Amino acid sequence: MTNTTGVIDPSTKDPHEMFVGWAPAPAVDRRFLLGALPLGLLAAGGASWKLAGKLNDPGAGAWLTGATHDVTGALVTHPYPMIRVTDPQAPFGMRTVLLVAVGKCTSSLTFGDMEAKPVTASGVLIQRKERRMLEVPPFAEEWLTPASAGMPVAAVKPPIQSLGGATLAGQIMDSKCFFGVMRPGRGKTHKACASLCIRGGIPPSFWARTKDGRESVLLLTDAAGGPMPMDILPFVADPVEAKGEIVRVGDLLQFRVDPAAIRRI
Amino acid sequence: MGHQYQAVQWNKNKIVYDLYMVAAVAVFFGVFMFIGLQTHPSGHTADPVVLAIRALGVTSFAMLTVVLAIGPLARLSPRFRPFLYNRRHLGVMTFVVAAAHFGLALLWYHGGGPLNPLVSMFVSNPLYDSIPGFPFEVLGFAAFLILMLMAVTSHDFWLNNLSAPVWKALHMLVYPAYALLVMHIVLGALMTEKSIVYPIVTAAAFIGVSALHLYTGMREWSADSGMKALKAKGWIDVCAPDDIPDKRAVIAPLPKGDRVAVFRYDGKVSAVTNACRHQNGPLGEGRVIDGCITCPWHGWQYRPDDGVSPPPFTEKISTYNVKIESGRVMVDPKPNPPGTRAEPVVIASEGAPA
C-alpha cells in the first residue's frame, strides 16, 4: 500500500459484500440479522416486562362504570355537593356520598330546589375503601328525583365535633381521581389533572399517612368549613404541610385550613 | 431515488423492516400493558388508560433512543447499516407513538375541565420558577412539536425542496428533542415513580446515546483533522492504481476539507465527491454495482464517469478529473459541476475494459 497520507481505504475495515436496501441482503448481513432481530424482540419484551413490573402501586379505588347506582338520602351542597344517607349500621349512623359531575366540571352541577330535601340520585359509583362518590350528569333533571322517604334531621344537619388543631404533612388531591377514577391519581404526573379538577369544583382532599402507615384522607375546607378557594391550586399534588382544625361532620372528617397556612415541604 | 415522489417506494427490505418495527413496538407496548395490568400484591390494579399513557410514553422514548443509536452504530460496524436503511420509517413511527401518548394524556389529564386542554397544559401547574416543580408537560409538548416537524418533512420531497443544508439543520433538532424528552421524564415520571429502575434506565439511555455519538464523532473529527492537514497544491497524488480494490474506492482529502472518492472499476479509475446527493452518505465506502457507484446508506446510484444517476433518475454529483502519472493516481482538486463527464483513466496494466 502506497497511499498518500490522509487517504482512507474503507475496504480494510469492511471487506464484505455491501448491504444495499433494494437488493437481497448479503450472507454476512443475513447471518447478523438472523441473530440480532430475535434478540431485539427479546430485549424489547424483557425491558418492557421489567419497567412495567416496577410501577408504583396504583392504590385502592374503583370506578364502577358498568352499572348505575341509586343513592337515597339528604342532598347537601355546602361546602361541596353530597348526599347523606342514614344507615344505623354505619359508624355515626350515616354514610356520606360526595357528588361530582361527569368530567371535571362539578361546579356546573344543578340541583333545582332539592337542597336539604330527601332525594334519589342515579349515577356511577366511585369507591375507595369506605369512601364513596357518585358521578352524575350536569343537569338535575337527568339524575335527581325527590324521594318519598322521611329524612332524619341528623342527615341534613349532622352533629359537628371538633377534634382539635393539627399540623399535617401530606398532599392535596382531587377526591374524584383519588377515589378511583385514576389509578394512580396522585403525584407529580397527576398534578395538572388534580389542579384542573379542583378548579372545576371537585372537592379537594388532604391525604396523609399516620406514623404507623395508615392512610388518612380528610375533606379539605377553608377555616370556616366552606369550600376551599382556588388559592390552593399551586400546592395541589405537592408535598405540603398544613395547619388547621380537624372536624367531624357526621361520618366525614374535614380538615379546615386557612389557605395561607399551607406551605410546600 | 427522487425522479418522482411517491409516499413510499416499497421494496422487500423496507417491508421486512417495517413489519419487524411494528412487531417490536407491539411486543414492547403489549408486554408493558399486560404486566402493568396485573394485580399488585396489595390487591390494586392500575387504570388501563393511565397505564396506556405510560406505555406509549416509554415506548416512544425507547424508539427515539434506538433511532439515535442507529447512526453511530452504523458508523462503527457496517452490520448495522440495514437498520439505517429505512430509519426514517422508524422515526415517523416514533412520532406516531409519541402522538398517541400526547393525545391520550391531553384528553385524560386535561380534557373535560373548565379550561381548554391546551391551555390547561400550560397553566394547571404554574410552578415555572421551580426546577423540581416545573410543569414537565410543556417539555414533552416542545419535543412533540419537533418530532412532528421532522415527521412531516421526512419525505425526500422536502429534502429536495428545502435544500439539503436546511433539511439537515431541521433534522438535527432531534437532539434538542431528545434532551427535552429526558427532562420531561426526569421532572415527571421520575418524580412520581419510586423504583430505582427508572432513573437507571433513563440515565443509561441518555448516556449510551451520548457516548455513542461522542465516540464516533471523535473518530470522525480525528479523521477530519488528518485530512485537513493536507496542504497540497495542484493535482493530488492519491495512491497507486492497484491500491484501490476492484469496484471499490479510496477516500482522499482535498485542501478545502472536502473529500473525493476515487473508484476503480473495469480497469478504469474515476473520481467523484464523497458526499451522496441524498443525505451526504459516504460514497467512498460504497461499491460499484451494475456499473454504478452505490451509496452504502440508502443505495442511491451514480455513473462513475459523469456522476449522474442512471435513468429514470436524474440526481447529479460532482466529478473530478483524474490522470495516472508515473504509476500514481492523480486527482485535480477542483470539482467539476455536478453531472459533468470526466473521462475515466484507463489503468495501463489492465487494458481497456471488455
Image (tube, coloured by chain):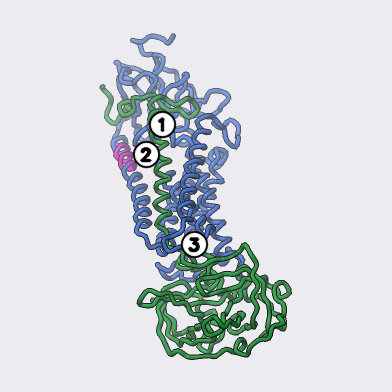
Chain colours: A green, B blue
Q: Position of residue A113 (x, y in %)?
A: 72, 83
**Part of the protein shown in magenta:** B216-223
Can you see residue A31? Answer: yes
| Image disc number at residue B73 | 2
- What chain letter is assigned to the residue under label 3? B
Can you see residue B187? Answer: no
Is B116 inside the magenta-drawn segment? no
- What chain letter is assigned to the residue under label 2? B
Spot the residue most to the right: A141
Which of A136/B292 is in front? A136
B112 w.r.t. B157: above or below = below
Residue position marked by numbered label 1 in the rendering: A34
Q: Dot 2: what SS?
A: helix
Q: Dot 1: what SS?
A: helix
- Dividing the image into 4 quarters, which one contains the C terminus of chain A? bottom left
Residue position marked by numbered label 3 in the rendering: B137
A82 w.r.t. B72: above or below = below
The three-letter amino acid code for the residue at tag 2 is Leu
Residue at point 41% right, 81% down?
A: A168
- Asked whether the residues under the numbered discs 3 and 1 touch, taking CB atoms below 8 Å apart as contact, a structural biologist would say no
In the image, B3: left or right of A162? Answer: right
